[in-house]
Amino acid sequence: MKQNLLRRNLWNTAGKAGLALGGVSAAFLFISHALTGVVLPGFISSLLNFALWAGKFGGCIWLMMFFMKRFVTENPEAGNSTTYRLGMASAFLSALIYAAVSFADVAFISADMYSETMDMVMQQMGSFMDSNTSAAMETMFERLPQYMFFSNLIYCFLYGTVLSFILSRSIPSRNPFADYKPEDQ
């Protein structure tokens, strides 16, 4: 019974964490799209993009740690392996959310922006390509939403899995002296 409750709590927390992590990453995607329309000097634009990326990177690490610590606090019987499983489930769910948002962005929301970029690339590189390479590029551009979905799904899941492995080593913290019993002197 306790195991089922722990598993249910794990997936409940993983769902919330996945939604939060996927939402942060999706917000970064759309904020970066909005900034492409703003005309700023090159240095300021690069600095702003780096600050946003660092905020997303640090924010995702903090969110993962927050949900792991909260889960351990609410479930004292959870160990390091359970915390790792929570992180993996959160990573998968957030990767699924972000991959779906990036698919929708490329296929529907910002399709015009990607189409213009692809046309510009084909115009600039067209003179250097033969007909076979040009046809292969066209096919690749047609399948870009699918490529984006699967590449983001795999990348985000692997990144989240590695992050949850690193964080779960110290959540919950281990007491090295917990089993120590002083001898009678």
Image (cartoon, rainbow, N blue to C red):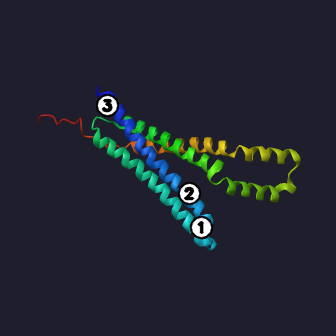
The quarter of the image holding the C terminus is top left
Residue in the foreground of this view, choosing between 19 and 128: 19
> In this view, which residue lies farthest toward the left?
185
Q: Nearer the viewer, residue 84 or 75?
A: 75
Q: Name the residue under label 1.
A: 46
- Residue 170: horizontal and vertical position, in percent? 36, 44
Counting residues from the start of the chain, the first of labels 1 and 3 encountered is 3
- Pick out the residue farthest to the top: 1
Quarter of the figure that contains the N terminus: top left
- In this rendering, the answer to whether 146 lies above or below 110 is above
Snapshot quadrant of residue 35: bottom right
- Residue extending farthest bottom: 41
Task: Say which of marks 1 and 2 sits in front.
Answer: 2
Q: Which amino acid does label 1 sit on?
A: Ser
Whether residue 130 appears in this view of the structure is yes
Amino acid under disc 3: Leu
- 92 or 167: nearer the viewer: 92
Instruction: Give the labeled residue for mark 3.
Output: 5
Question: Disc 2 on helix, strand or loop?
Answer: helix
Residue 95 vs 181, above or below: the answer is: below
Using residue 71 as the reference point, say whether residue 143 is left or right of it.
right
The structure residue drawn at horizontal position 34% and vertical position 46%, both measured from the top left corner, is: 69
Image spot of residue 155 (x, y percent): 57, 44
Residue at x 48% of width, y 53% of height: 24
Residue beneath the point at 44% across and 51% down:
61
Q: How crowded is mark 3: few (under 14 residues within 10 Å), some or many (20 or more)?
A: few
Which residue is the site of mark 2? 30
Instruction: State the CA–CA distance, disc 1 to disc 2.
Output: 17 Å
From the viewer's perspective, is the residue at label 2 or at label 3 nearer?
A: 2
Picture coordinates of residue 116 (x, y %)? Answer: 73, 58
